[in-house]
Amino acid sequence: MTVTVDAAPYTVEEVCERFDPVMGLEVHVELNTATKMFCGCANAFGAEPNTNICPVCLGLPGSLPRLNGTAVESAIRIGLALNCQVRERSGFARKNYFYPDMPKNFQISQYEDPIVFDGYLDVPLDDGDTWRVEIERAHMEEDTGKSLHIGGATGRIHGADHSLLDYNRAGVPLIEIVTKPIVGAGVRAPEVARAYVTALRDVLRGLGVSDVRMDQGSMRCDANVSLKPKGTEAFGTRTETKNVNSLRSVERAVRYEMGRHAGVLLSGGTVTQETRHFDEQSGTTSAGRPKETFADYRFFPEPDLPPLEPPRDWVETLRAGLPERPWERRARIQTEWGLSDEELRDLVNADALDLVADTVDAGAPPESARSWWVSYLAQQANTAGVTLPELAITPAQVARVVALVSEGTLTNKLARQVVDGVLAGEGEPDEVVAGRGLAVVSDESALTAAVDEALAAQPDIAEKIRAGKTKAAGAIVGAVMKATRGQADAARVQELVLERCQ
Amino acid sequence: MSDITRDDVAHLARLARLAVSDAELDVFSGQIDAIVDTVSRVGEIPDDVPPTAQVVPQTNVLRPDAVEPSLPRDVALAEAPAAEEGRFRVPRILGEEL
Amino acid sequence: MNASELISLDAAELARRIHAREVSSVDVTRAHLERIEAVDGPAESGVHAFLHLDAEGALAAAEAADRAIAEGAPASPLAGVPIALKDNLTTTDMPTTAASRILEGWRPPYDATVVSRLRAAGLVPLGKTNLDEFAMGSSTENSAFGPSRNPWDLTRIPGGSGGGSSSAVAAGESPLALGSDTGGSIRQPGAVTGTVGVKPTYGTVSRYGLIAFSSSLDQIGPCARSVLDAALLHEVIGGADPRDQTSVSAPLPPVVEAAQAGARGDLAGVRVGVVTEFSGEGYQPGVLGAFTDAVRVLGELGAEVVEVSCPSFGYALPAYYLIAPSEASSNLARFDAMRYGLRVGDDGEHAADEVMSLTREAGFGAEVKRRIMIGTHALSAGSYDALYGKAQKARTLIVRDFTAAFETCDVLISPTTPTTAFPIGERADDPLAMYLADLCTIPSNLAGNAALSVPCGLSADDGLPVGLQIMAPALADDRAYRVAAAYEVARGDTGPRIPELRALETTR
């Protein structure tokens, strides 16, 4: 009996009173290599349609794939960062199925021998706990082209009368990372799913191998969910939910499917093994078009590419060059900079951690670097309506400004003007200082002359100061500051005024 | 014989996207059955013999990740049965893969 | 020098005369174009070696070659010599069809690597030659554009799949041609047309731009009327290519040097193994007679001839007819009416998937459909282990047999094909009978080693050419050339290199 359930009728807590959820997460990541997986066409997002295509990625008769060495390197680095083994001998296979967005009607992928396998990722959860997600494998494959459906009311596939194909994305390098079944998470399953994808995204970003933009499709997640009655061993029938395009959606999709499965099972139905689509608006999933026949991809070894046998020393060099894991780095930085949990969280939330760290690496003290990014620069970003990383100033430039202040060339007020100049495209900080004439007047004779001039201009005040009314010095200091267009160090001016009136 | 039926051949034709006629099915099913029967002789080979998929005597052949010129778009589209707005125009696509 | 003399000369001799400016490349090219004009058509009764001729392009290339030679800078030893190209090699200036309706009129936007190398070497491409559709066949009868005919008897097949290239060379329409050999498609046509055909070691000639039939078996190679000519062409097209990652980085064996050394006629110390499995039932007596005579000649040249058994070769034919269709079913999936080639049924009603099926049904011939379905079956989840998987194991056994045989022998020999050219139509409806034509040639494709066919006289029973197959280890192509060149000289001139076109004369 098949029961159709539209809304998930059970909360996760209710589901877990009767069932244990089992999840499997498949994440596809587009690598940010310069070129495609098997040809020298540019791997670029957003180009004019069909401008990055050649005989190879268009699957023209006679063309042959040429494996991108950097893509292989990225795949190995991803595997090592996920604590995987690197297979001594791996290779490619053809996955055969017909679809118009796939120029050869087969996808070059890896089947029995993925380049890396058997790893894990320790995933930080919201409450500070860690959940170990076991990794089954990660393998290399090529992306498909994109279709535009014309003539349907919604511009979607259903109801369209023809389609237009752009093969720019065809052949873009993909890494598919597949977890082993995630069991035992119980009510935390949706959170674990989100936390895993978040941690994976952070790891990949740290490796610099992908843009990991879920909104642009450079990171895509399929969530497999099934339920088994508490105390039983055999897994239930699973569904595979696609179109999960944000971290939040990962959690929502898993939560929804858990509830939906429970609804079907508790009303005496059976879950249908199928592909489902997540709808961002409603937070629900719906069944895809049923497959006319059971998929038989007729995998066989790709005859056009020789096997891969990554040399040990290469793998070890790559391992040695791995960056710290993002959360380990955060913990280290927190200690080194003496940040509170809240201060660290603010930095991370503002996307400022890397910027501050780079500013510190460029020579600025952590406190100054942090202060610049979270206050003045954050305000400027906010005003301009951009994110901090998008601001037109580099960590090195901020570090230079900090240095100019600490060596006394700039006051804090002047420093802000220099930053404004950099943001306005006036060049490097030193160029702005020169161009705007912003340096502190530190030439003692010039300053002394200015003080003498001010005292001479206001003899009555000079007289009061000489009479010991030092508070009157403020007016002279103000005049000097005005005369130097604010570029004098006010404290030094105050000292000079008092000296000259002795 | 190899027990390949007319229905099996019809299924293979669907998988391979060949709209074969009934008359062709009659001819093909007999021929394919006979051919598969003949080539099934390889079944005698012991399972413990390792497979050979290709005879290339080298491994780790990699291309440097350097951009090369793509085809001009008009050249890429020149042989298309139909093109529109710089894209390949194809009949409406039904649903997902397979 | 008259035209009939020019068309009968070997490429090496033509090149010598062109480079000595005794004759121009333009004159040589024109002589061949005239020969083609005289004997190639009509499609229904002529040799029909060519699917496309480019007289204008050929004469322009010939003029360029003549200019370079006049300036004292010929591009290569074969500069100025005409050549025919099998129509499964991509060319920017000529259509490329693989003899299939599904690609009729297709203009590739790129040249195959071998074509680029020919152009750079100053050779003169005349046109594109006929083949069995997508190189699947042994007779050219599977060409969508009608069969080619054997110049020795125009009622008979010129072999296949490269029957267009072999018949062009045999008929004096071109001194040289390129072919592709997946199961014997260069060597078997060479044997039945009395020409030389070479399948180089797998990976030593780039496959970039060769429309794939079975990628792990396909190999481009030369067709010629002499062993030296084949070697000269081999050196033009061979060598590593970054566009083909299965191309071998090792240096090309010195095949020209070997052909020249062999022609001096001494095979002392060379151990020649006669493969005992390739004789007996199914072998035409006249073929075995010519082969036995060749064995005697090799002995007289000083070679030590021994018998050698390769028991697993019996699995070669079944393994081949699983592996090749399997890879083909995948390679030919791209012909789907979406991006290039034929489109059938795009009437606004049929969906993309239906248009694919209608186009493939209309665009592929019967043999191609059969092989696609067999391959689809062999790779299916339920059959993979018993069929494709076992065929891969058979391949291992065949490699082992070769390895063992080459421990005791320098080269192996056999007839190239069990029979001489059969009449057009005789096996057209019997695929299994047709497949037997490749019995002796297939093992070298499965193992990837070098093999060639050299003319071995005429069969006593029908007066048609017989081929001697010489097989050498991978990357030892030079050994096969040396033995072939020695044999070629020793066999002597057993008749005209270019046959009278007998049936043609009578049918006209």
Image: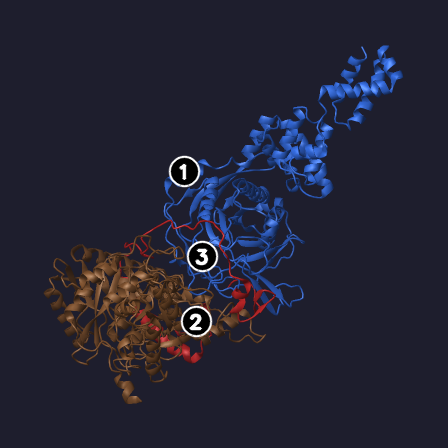
Q: Amino acid at mark 3?
A: Ile
Q: Nearer the viewer, mark 2 or mark 1?
A: 2
Q: CA distance from mark 3 to mark 1?
A: 27 Å
The blue chain is: A
Q: Nearer the viewer, residue C3 or A390?
A: C3
**Do tags 2 and 1 sit on the same chain?**
no
The relative height of residue A425 versus residue A1 in the rendered view (above or below) is above
Q: Residues within 10 Å of mark 3 (few under 14, many from 20)?
A: many
Q: Residues within 10 Å of mark 1 (few under 14, many from 20)?
A: few
Q: Are marks 3 and 2 in contact (CB under 8 Å)?
A: no
The red chain is: B
| Residue A361 drawn at (x, y percent) | 57, 31
Relative to C157, is A140 on the left or the right? right
Q: Amino acid at mark 1?
A: Glu
* Location of mark 3 (residue): A108
Q: Secondary structure at mark 3?
A: strand
On-image quarter of the N terminus of chain C: bottom left
Residue C223: numbered disc: none
The relative height of residue C266 versus residue C293 in the rendered view (above or below) is above
Residue A316: numbered disc: 1
Which chain letter goes with mark 1?
A: A
Taking the spot 28% from the left edge, 87% from the top edge, the residue there is C505
Q: Secondary structure at mark 2?
A: loop
Which chain letter goes with mark 3?
A: A
Using the rendered image of the protein, determine whether residue C214 is visible from the camera's viewpoint: no
Which chain letter goes with mark 2?
A: C
Q: Nearer the viewer, residue C163 or C372?
A: C163
Relative to A312, is A294 on the left or the right? right
| Residue C444 drawn at (x, y percent) | 26, 62
Q: Secondary structure at mark 1?
A: helix
Relative to C60, is A54 on the left or the right? right
